[in-house]
Amino acid sequence: MNKNFLSFIHLADIHFDKNSGDPHDLDEDIRNELLRDIDQNVISKIGTPDAIFVCGDISFSANSTEYDTAKVFLFELCDKLKINKTQVFCVPGNHDVDRNIPMSSEGFLTIQEKIETATNIDEQIVKYHRDTIFNNSLFEHIHSYNSFASLFRCNISVDKPVWTEDFTLNDNTYLRIIGLNSVIISNHNDTLERRMIIGANQIPKNEDNVTYLSLCHHPHECLVDRHQIINKINQRIKIQLYGHKHVHSLNIVNDNLIIGAGATHPSRSEKEWIPRYNWLTISTICDEGKSNLVVKVFPRLFSKDSQSFEPDYNSCGGNEFKQFFLKHQCKNGIKIESSNKQKSRIKEEDDDTTVEKDIMADLKSISDREIAYDFFSLSYVLRHKLLSDFGLITESDEGIEHQSIIERILEDLRDRDDIKSFHDSIIKIME
C-alpha cells in the first residue's frame, strides 16, 4: 500500500501482572487474538503503521518482571507489523507506579501532598524541579517504568519531564507526538475517584507548522488541576489519546479530537468486560484554500460471539472507522526543522568527497532512538564500561541511573562527533 498518511496503533491499560504469561494466564488468549487481528487486517486497512502508542498501565504493580513480559508482547507486535522495535511510544499510568516508595518514604509522600494541596500547583511543581536536593525524587516512584521506557526514549526525569517525537505529514508539516506524565502524585492512596495532576509546564508551546498529538494516561475529568490547564491543552493539542477509564470514547471538543482507548486487558470483574484497542490514520487535505486534518479512528473490540477482535460498528455508524475533519493551522506548508531531527556536524561543502558523503549518510541513518534502544539492550555492566571507555562518566554521575543521563550522553557524543563510533561499539558488543 502506497501511503500518503500516517498510521498508528493505540493501546492502553494492558496491566501485565506477575502471573502474565504463565500456563494459567487467561489474558494470553486476548493478546494472541490481538496479534492475529494485527497480522490479518492492519496492513490491508491502514498500511504499515508508523508507531505503536501505549497510554499507560503497562504493568499492574510496577514490577520489573511485568515489564519483561510487556517487552515480549510489544516486540512480537512490532514483528507482526514489520516495524522497528524503536517505534514504541509510551507514558506511565497509575499502575506503573511503585506504591512501595510512597508507603515506605514519609518524605516522598510529603512532597506529593505539598503539590496536591498547593494553592498554586504549577509554582509548587516548579519549586521542586529547581530544588537540586529533592528534584530527582519526583520520579522515584516510576523507576521501574523509566527503566523499561528508556529502551524507547520515553523515560522522563527532571531534565526531561516530557518527551517528543516528530512525524512528517503529507503536506510537509509536522505531527509532533508528546508524552505527558499524569502520575506525579500517584501513590498507594489512589482510588478510582482520586484525581491526578499534570501541571502547565508539560503543555507544549505553539509552533508554526506543528500539530500536536498527546499521549496521556488520565483524561481531563481525572485531574485536580483540570480547570487550570484544560483550556491550554485544548488550545495546543489537536489530538489527545488517553487510557485509564477502560471505556472507548470519541469526542470532539473545541475542534480537538479526544480518544479514550478502552483497555486491552480490562479486569474480568468489571461489569462490561470488553478488551479494546484502536487504529488511527492521520493526513491533511487542502480544498479551496482551507486546510484540514483528516483523522480516521478504527475502534477494535473483542467479540464474545466470534471470540476474536473485530470492528466496533456501533461506535462508527455501521462502518469500520469514524472520520473526523479538524481545522489544520498550517500557515505556509513549508517543512520546518524538526526538534528531534538529527543534525550532522559534517560540513556539506565537500560533497564531492565520497568519504564525507558516506559519513554523512551514516550519521543521518542513526537516530537517537536507535542508539538508546541498542544501548539499553546491554547489561548495566557493559553499559558502564562503554561509557567509561568513551569518557562519558564523571564523578558526579556515580550512583545515577544511565536512563537519567542518556540525553546528556547523546548530546556530548554529537558535540564530539563520536556518535557513529559509539554506536559501532554497541553493535560490536551485541555481536
Image (cartoon, grey):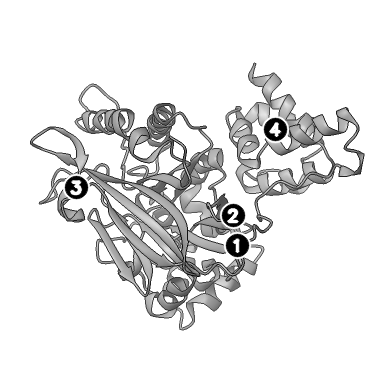
Quarter of the image with the C terminus in it:
top right
Amino acid, disc 2: Asn
Amino acid, disc 1: Gly
The residue lying at 79 percent from left, 36 percent from top is 360
Secondary structure of the residue carrying tag 1 is loop
Task: List x then y, in percent, for residue 100.
Answer: 40, 49
Q: What label does residue 384 carry, if any?
A: 4
Task: List x then y, in percent, for residue 204.
Answer: 55, 67
Q: Which residue is mark 1?
A: 333
Q: Which residue is mark 2?
A: 172
Which one is earlier in the sequence, the residue at label 4 or at label 3?
A: 3
Asked if the residue at tag 2 contacts the one at tag 1, i.e. Cβ–Cβ closer than 8 Å, the answer is: yes
Residue 165 placement, left or right of 144: right
Which one is earlier in the sequence, the residue at label 1 or at label 4?
A: 1
Structural distance between the alpha carbons of marks 3 and 2? 32 Å
Q: Which residue is mark 3?
A: 312
Within 10 angstroms of label 2, few (less than 14), some, or many (20 or more) residues?
some
Secondary structure of the residue carrying tag 2 is loop
